[in-house]
Every structure is written in C-alpha cells, then in structure tokens.
Amino acid sequence: MNDGTSVLALEGLADPLAFGASGDPLGREWMAALPARIEDLMQGWGLQLDGRSMSHGFNAIVVPVLRNKEPCVLKVTWPEQRSELEAEALRAWAGTGAVKAIAARTDLGALLLERLDQERPLTTLGLVQAAQIAGALVRRLAIPAPDGFPKLSDLAEEIASSLSIQQETLGSPVPSGWLDAAEALVRELGAEVGDSLIHSDIHYGNILAGEREQWLAIDPRPVVGDPEYSIPELLWTRVDETDGTQGVTQLLAVLVESGNLDADKARGWAIVRSVEYWLWGLQNGLTEDPLRCERIVDALL
C-alpha cells in the first residue's frame, strides 16, 4: 500500500470486551488475523487508510478509507456469512434510503460502503423530529423483495413457539395476560404478512447523516414482511424521553403517521416484539431494556 499502512497500524481494532467474536474460539482466531485481513482487503481494493477514527459494533469493524480520493468505509463482519444478506439488501435498495454498497467480498465478510457521518446519528435530533424522519425512512425502505431473504412469517412462528418457554424458564416475569395477548397477536400478524423487503433492526443510531441524502440507514437486518415490524425498536430505544402512557402512544402515532403505516399492525408488533425483547433481555442479564419494554406493553395494552 502506498500510504505506508501496516498491520501494526491496524492492531487493537477489536476490543475483546465489546466484540462478539471474543466469546467464540474461532472468533478469537479471526480477531487475531483481522489486521492482516484488513490490509489484504485494502490492497485488493486499492484503498488508503484515512485517519484513525476506526469503530466497531458487536459484530463488525468499520475502518475509514479512501478509494481514488473518495471517502468510503471498509466494514468487516464476523461471522463472515452475516455480510451476505446485508450486501444483497443494500444492492436491492441501491442507495435509496440506505447507505450505498460500492463493493463486496462476502466470502471475507467485507463490504466497501459510502462514507456517512458517524458523528451525526439520528439520536442527535429531538425525539419528535427524529421519529418523523425514521418513520418516513421505514416506509421508503419497504420495497418489493427479491428472493432469498428470511420471511417474517417464519420469524413469527419462532416467536409464537418460544414466548411461553422463555416465560416459564425465567419464572414468569411477564404478567400472564400480557403474554397471552402477545402470543395471540403474533399468530394473527404472522398469518398474513406482506412481501416487502424491510430493515428489521432500524433504530435512531442506525440512521446517519449523509451528503447524497440527508439521512440514510445502515446495518440492515433484512426480512420480507410488513414495515410495521420495524417500529418497536424505534419505540424502546428512546422511550425514556417520553412522558407516561400518553407519551408512548404519541410516539407510536408519530412513527405510524410519518411512515404511512397500519396503526393496528404497528401496535401489535410493538407489543409482540417488546414482550419478546423483555424476555430476551432478562435471559441475557439486561436491566434497563426489560423495564422499557414493560412500560411500552403497559401503555399499549
């Protein structure tokens, strides 16, 4: 590489305390080889390292790079196969409402993406304005789905079959009436789902400011189904900023109106996914998120 980037310059990318690969022996081997993999990718794509503001989430490293002087980011994911559906979804959206994919090596878990402003997520805006933007983006991302993506009907079956098991395992933390309502709703909603490609992990931190468009979604978890399935995370990630039951219902109403969504489906998925995440959170030692989910379910039921 002509900018003098070395493996040593890339060491320390993955904080072992905060990266998903650290909990798996194969993942730790992957982490040890990560600097060399990144350098190989940079050489293959003709990239230059652009600053040291590298970042990572639970499953991916993001490195700022230049390609022919164009600012981009190199995203490397573990396990590598996680990048396959992300790449396919980004190709389908083709930059409409989502970050644009420039190149992909999914066999290596690598995506080359347009550079967005990681210092300006949608969390930097006030709640109502952010919810209006997010709701509209949920609608824009709901396009006819290509073949090959997971189906919401299958996810609904998995949720329906797992809620009671988790409830019993955890000592029945969810009031029985609420659990019954969630099980009934997920069966009803899963019986007739749409055929849109949706971003099922959209939240205010996964929407960044861009130049080509003002706000663009990143890190998709693509699913074929109803866009209303995307709404619950936009509730629980900022529900602490709402006031009482009315605040929760008003936030839901803003998301529904701005996204031109079905209010009953949005409410139903909000209840189902909040109960599901409540139980998952308790199972995984979370303390604040289960309380947020409880508050949402209480408000909507």
Image (spheres, rainbow, N blue to C red):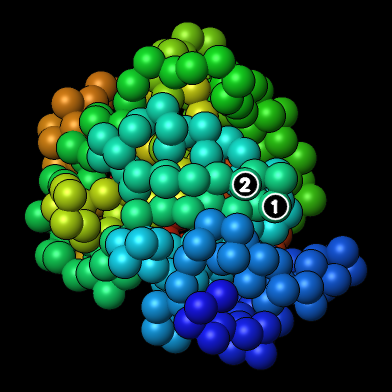
From the image, tell me which residue sits under label 1: 108
The three-letter amino acid code for the residue at tag 2 is Arg
Measuring from the top left, give residue 111's x and y in whole percent. Answer: 53, 51
Viewport quadrant of the N terminus = bottom right
User: Where residue 233 appears, x then y in whole percent?
Assistant: 39, 49
Left or right of 206? Residue 246 is: left
Reading the image, the residue beneath label 2 is 105
Q: Secondary structure at mark 1?
A: helix
Percent of width and height locating residue 166: 72, 46
Q: Position of residue 138 (x, y in %)?
A: 28, 36
Q: In front here: 282 or 211?
A: 211
In the image, 209: left or right of 145?
Answer: left
Q: Nearer the viewer, residue 99 or 22?
A: 99
Question: Helix or strand or loop: what does disc 2 sit on?
Answer: strand
Asked if residue 80 can be seen in this view, the reply is yes
Three-letter code for the amino acid on which mark 1 is drawn: Leu
Nearer-the-camera pick, 196 or 181: 196
Task: Give the distance between the C-alpha atoms of the residues marked 1 and 2, in whole angstroms.
Answer: 6 Å
Q: Are marks 1 and 2 in contact (CB under 8 Å)?
A: yes
